[in-house]
Amino acid sequence: MARTISLKMQNLNDELLVELGDSLIMRWATGDDIDELAEFNIRLHSDNPDEPQLWLGEWTRDLMEGNHPTTNAADFTLIIDQNQGDKIVSSLCLISQTWTYAGMPFGVGRIELVGTDPAYRRRGLVRCQMEIIHKRSAAKGELIQAITGIPWYYRQFGYEMALNLGGSRELFWARFGNDNPQEEELFKMRPALATDIPKLDELYRFHCGQSLISCRRDKQSWEFGLFKASSCTPGRQRAQIIEDAEGHVHAYVDFWPWRSAFTVREVGVKPGSSWREVCLFLVRQLKLQADMLNETREKSITNIYFSLGESHSVYNALDDQLERPQKPYAWYIRVPDLKRFLDHISPLLERRLEQSVVAGYSGKLRLNFYRDNLCLKFEQGRLTAVNNYEPQNVEDADALFPELTFLQLAFGYRSYKELDYSFADCYAKNTEATILLNALFPRCPSDINPL
C-alpha cells in the first residue's frame, strides 16, 4: 500500500519526488512524458480495447504541450515503476478554470484523466495523487475541486455528486412537422472567426442564462477552443455564427456530428431575437448538412441531440417537437472549506433572503453535518458570520444533513424538500429553518461546459 503523503505545497513550483515503496515513485510530468502518457491514456480510458479512442491521446497532448490556457505537463502527476523501465503505471491531472455562481466567479480545479494500470490497482496510488493535486489546487486559490467519473468512486476522496452533468432532448426529422421546408430563410450560418470572439462571449452568457453555475471563458480560452484544440477532442469548439442578410449577428451554435446525430452543446440568442425562429432555422440547416454528409457516411445522421442540460431556452422554443427529457448524470464536487465558500457567495444568499418571505431576517441557522457543523448568523438580512458551534448532542441543530448531502443543496442540485424525502436523517427541527433553507438554497439546475 502507498503511504500517506505529508508534502507541504506552498508554491506551485515545488518539486515532487516521493518514494512509495515497491520501486514506485511519484513525480510531476514533463514534456518528455507526453508520448508515453498519451498512449497510456488511450489504453486505460478507451471503452473498448479493440477500438482505441485516439482522441484521448490528442486531448492529453492538448493539455500538456503548453497551448492550453491553464494547464501544461507540470499539472499531471505520474507514478512510475523503476523496476519496469520507469514505465507510467498511474496518472491524473488538474485543469484549472473559473466558474461562476449566479455570476460570482470562483476558482475550480477540475481533476481529469485519472487512471491506473490494472496490475497496480488497490494500492492507494490514486489517493496519493489526489492528496498532492488537492494541495496544488489549493495553492492556486481554487475554492472547489470537481470531477466527472464513475459511480461512487470519488466519494472516498471527499467528493459528493452535487451538480448536474449532461441532460438532453432529441429531435428526429422523421417525426411529423420536424422537416418542414422554408422557401426563404431569415438567417444564414457561418464558422466563427477570431473577430467574433467578443460577440461569442456575449451570446455565451445567454446560453448560460438558466444555469446557476457556468464556466467563465476569457479571450485566450475562446482562441484555444476555436483554433488550437485538436479537432477530435471535447475541448474543440465548433462555433457557428447565425446572422441575417445584413450581417447582424442574432445567435451562435456549437455542434458536431457524433454517431447518428448532430450533438448541439451550446446555443445563445441575443435579446430581442426569437429563440423559436433561430431554433427552427437551426433544425432546417442541420437537416441540409445531414443530407449531404449521409451521401458518404456508413451510419446516417438521423436526428439532433440537444445536450443542453436539464433546462434550456431551446427546449422551450421547440417544445413538443422534442422527445422526452433524458436524465442528467452528476459532477462530483469537493469543497475543502465550506465556510469559505459560503462567505464567498454571501452576497447572493443575502439577495435571496431579501427577495423571500423572511426579508430582513435576524437570527441563526445552525447546520449539523454530524461530523462537523456551521452556524450562519444573520442581522437584518445580512450574513454577518459563518462559524462552527458546540452541539450539546447529536441532534443539536436547526437542520441536519448526513455526510456531504448539504453540498447538493448548496449547489442547487436538490431542494431541501427532496433531501428531506431521500434521507431519513436529513431534516429541519423547526418551520423557520425550513423556510430559511428554501429561501437561501432553492433548487437551480446547472449545465457546465468546462475547459
Image (cartoon, rainbow, N blue to C red):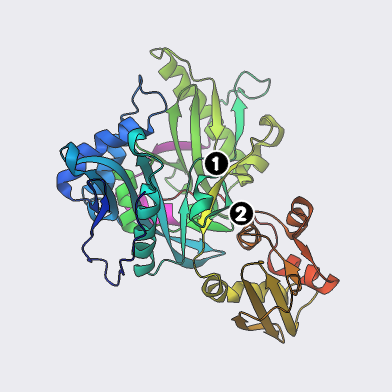
Residue 145: name its quadrant: bottom left
- Relative height, residue 426 to residue 377 (above, below): above
Q: Is residue 325 left or right of residue 430?
A: left
The percent coordinates of residue 209 (x first, y second) are 57, 55
- Specify few, some or many for label 2: CA neighbours under 10 Å numbering under 14, 14-19, or 20 or more: some
Q: Is residue 362 left or right of residue 230?
A: right
The percent coordinates of residue 129 (x first, y second) are 35, 53
Q: Is residue 68 visible?
A: no
Number of numbered discs: 2
Toward the viewer: 264 or 251?
A: 264
- Relative height, residue 278 to residue 48 (above, below): below
Secondary-structure class at tag 1: loop
Residue 325, which numbered label?
none
- Relative height, residue 51 to residue 163 (above, below): above
Residue 182: name its quadrant: top right
- Relative height, residue 231 to residue 76 (above, below): above
Q: Distance from label 2 to label 1 (Cα)?
A: 27 Å
Residue sitting at x 54%, y 38%:
307
The percent coordinates of residue 188 (x first, y second) are 45, 36
Q: Which residue is mark 1?
A: 151
Residue sitting at x 51%, y 70%:
337
- Specify few, some or many for label 1: CA neighbours under 10 Å numbering under 14, 14-19, or 20 or more: few
Residue sitting at x 70%, y 82%:
381
* Amino acid at the residue labelled 1: Pro
In the image, residue 258 lies in the stretch drawn in magenta: no
Q: Which residue is mark 2?
A: 210
